[in-house]
């Protein structure tokens, strides 16, 4: 049983200077880069999921813009799969499931952005498809939200979504913990 790393939407628009800057994006991509390094060293598959906006009125991840490009810290290496998506769920109308099955992956380590949107929907879909999921909680980032006139801080959004995913859909751990897992050497 192989393990694959799935990186979700680690794209420039989520970083300082981008059109949808997230809280903690720089720290999250640094942790994701640690995972990439560990998976590459272990000869395990790394899959990059990249959102390209198709929705009318979209303000970020616009086709052909620098903001839609994958962040330099986790840029795909030659031979690594890149899956383009147009919806929050990384599996919806994409080749992600086929790519993971072709790689023989039954376990996934996931990281990315935004925790409350694309990470959440992709992790839940992966679990529904039968993958054993591990989420690197510190390799994800989100933003402040508003609801019913209330401001919800990004830290609280992050904790709520990680808590909701942990147990039922994934095992949430730190990137450091996941880099040290024994399955890394059992490709």
Image (tube, rainbow, N blue to C red):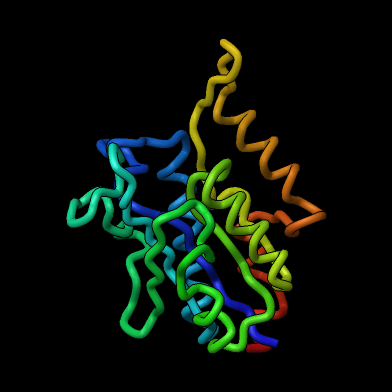
Residue at (72, 49) in percent of width and height: 165
Residue 185 picture location, percent across and down: 65, 85
Residue at (51, 38) in percent of width and height: 142
Most foreground residue, 3 or 90: 90
Instruction: Check the image and report above or below for 36 versus 165.
Output: below
Quadrant in the rendering for residue 181: bottom right
Residue at (67, 57) in percent of width and height: 124
Residue 25 picture location, percent across and down: 43, 43
Q: Does 24 sit left or right of 59 as displayed? A: right
Quadrant in the rendering for residue 186: bottom right
Most foreground residue, 92 or 141: 92
| Quadrant into which the N terminus falls | bottom right
Q: Does 39 sit left or right of 125 as displayed? A: left
Q: Does 52 sit left or right of 27 as displayed? A: left
Residue 3 picture location, percent across and down: 63, 79
Most foreground residue, 61 or 74: 61
Can see residue 104? yes
Residue 32 picture location, percent across and down: 49, 59
Can see residue 59? no
Instruction: Check the image and report above or below for 140 versus 73.
Output: above
């Amino acid at each position: 049983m192989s393990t694959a790393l799935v990186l979700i939407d680690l794209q420039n628009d989520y970083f300082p200077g981008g059109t949808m800057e997230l809280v903690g994006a720089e720290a999250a991509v640094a942790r994701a880069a640690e995972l990439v390094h560990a998976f590459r060293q272990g000869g395990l598959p790394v899959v990059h999921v990249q959102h390209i906006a198709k929705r009318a009125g979209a303000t970020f991840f616009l086709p052909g813009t620098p903001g839609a490009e994958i962040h330099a810290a986790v840029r795909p290496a030659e031979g690594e799969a890149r899956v383009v998506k147009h919806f929050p769920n990384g599996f919806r109308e994409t080749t992600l499931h086929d790519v993971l099955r072709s790689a023989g992956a039954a376990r996934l380590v996931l990281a990315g952005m935004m925790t409350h949107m694309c990470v959440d929907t992709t992790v839940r879909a992966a679990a529904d498809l039968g993958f054993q999921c591990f989420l690197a909680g510190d390799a994800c980032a989100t933003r402040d939200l508003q609801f019913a006139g209330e401001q919800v801080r990004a830290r609280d959004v992050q904790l709520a979504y990680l808590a909701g995913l942990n147990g039922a859909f994934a095992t949430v751990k730190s990137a450091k913990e996941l880099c040290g897992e024994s399955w890394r050497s059992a490709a």
